[in-house]
Image (spheres, rainbow, N blue to C red):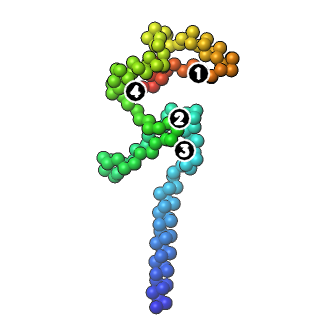
């Protein structure tokens, strides 16, 4: 009876010890989660893409990790976006997109005046710089 108890205890210890050792060896090279989160702060959240986790065959999607601040973000080729959607985005962002050389002096002056008067802060980023990131 004592031999059975000792055998079970030894088996349990070896099993748990082996599981802990396997876990530690598999996770040793992984970065600290706080470091990953720090990389995707509000300053550089443009680079976050939705993470997709597939099964071992790579065919069946198991899970998607979607950033709660930016939503589902995936790169899409420009030819996969309809002309209507592209034109609507340009129209809502910059009416003079096709007429200006990449900057709008009137818009920059308006943003400067608004910023100096303590109004809503307006940025200088233009549609052209946004659209140039489209692959």
Q: Residue 131: percent from the left, percent from the top?
A: 44, 22
Q: Residue 125: percent from the left, percent from the top?
A: 54, 21
Q: Residue at horizontal 50%, vertical 65%?
A: 20
Q: Earlier in the sequence, mark 4 or mark 1?
A: 1
Q: Nearer the viewer, residue 45 or 9?
A: 45
Q: Dot 4, crowdedness within 10 Å: few (<14), some or many (≥20)?
A: few
Q: CA distance from mark 2 to mark 4?
A: 18 Å
Select label 2 or label 3 by which is in front. Answer: 2
Q: CA distance from mark 1 to mark 2?
A: 16 Å
- For residue 36, the mark is 3
Q: CA distance from mark 3 to mark 1?
A: 27 Å
Q: Earlier in the sequence, mark 2 or mark 4?
A: 2
Q: CA distance from mark 2 to mark 3?
A: 12 Å
Which of the 4 image quadrants contains residue 81? top left
Select label 1 or label 2 by which is in front. Answer: 1
Q: Residue furthest bottom?
A: 1
Q: Earlier in the sequence, mark 1 or mark 2?
A: 2
Q: Is residue 25 above or below residue 119?
A: below
Q: Are marks 3 and 4 in contact (CB under 8 Å)?
A: no
Q: Is residue 123 left or right of residue 22?
A: right
Q: Nearer the viewer, residue 48 or 22?
A: 48
- For residue 123, the mark is 1
Q: Earlier in the sequence, mark 3 or mark 4?
A: 3
């Amino acid at each position: 009876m004592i031999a059975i108890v000792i055998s079970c205890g030894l088996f349990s210890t070896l099993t748990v010890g082996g599981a802990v050792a396997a876990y530690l060896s598999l996770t040793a090279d992984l970065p600290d989660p706080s470091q990953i989160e720090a990389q995707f702060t509000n300053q550089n959240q443009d680079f976050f893409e939705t993470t997709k986790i597939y099964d071992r065959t790579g065919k069946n999607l198991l899970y998607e990790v979607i950033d709660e601040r930016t939503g589902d973000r995936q790169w899409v080729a420009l030819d996969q976006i309809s002309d209507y959607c592209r034109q609507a985005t340009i129209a809502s962002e910059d009416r003079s997109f096709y007429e200006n050389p990449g900057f709008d002096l009137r818009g920059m002056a308006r943003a400067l005046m608004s910023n100096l008067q303590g109004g809503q802060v307006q940025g200088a980023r233009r549609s052209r710089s946004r659209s140039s990131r489209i692959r």
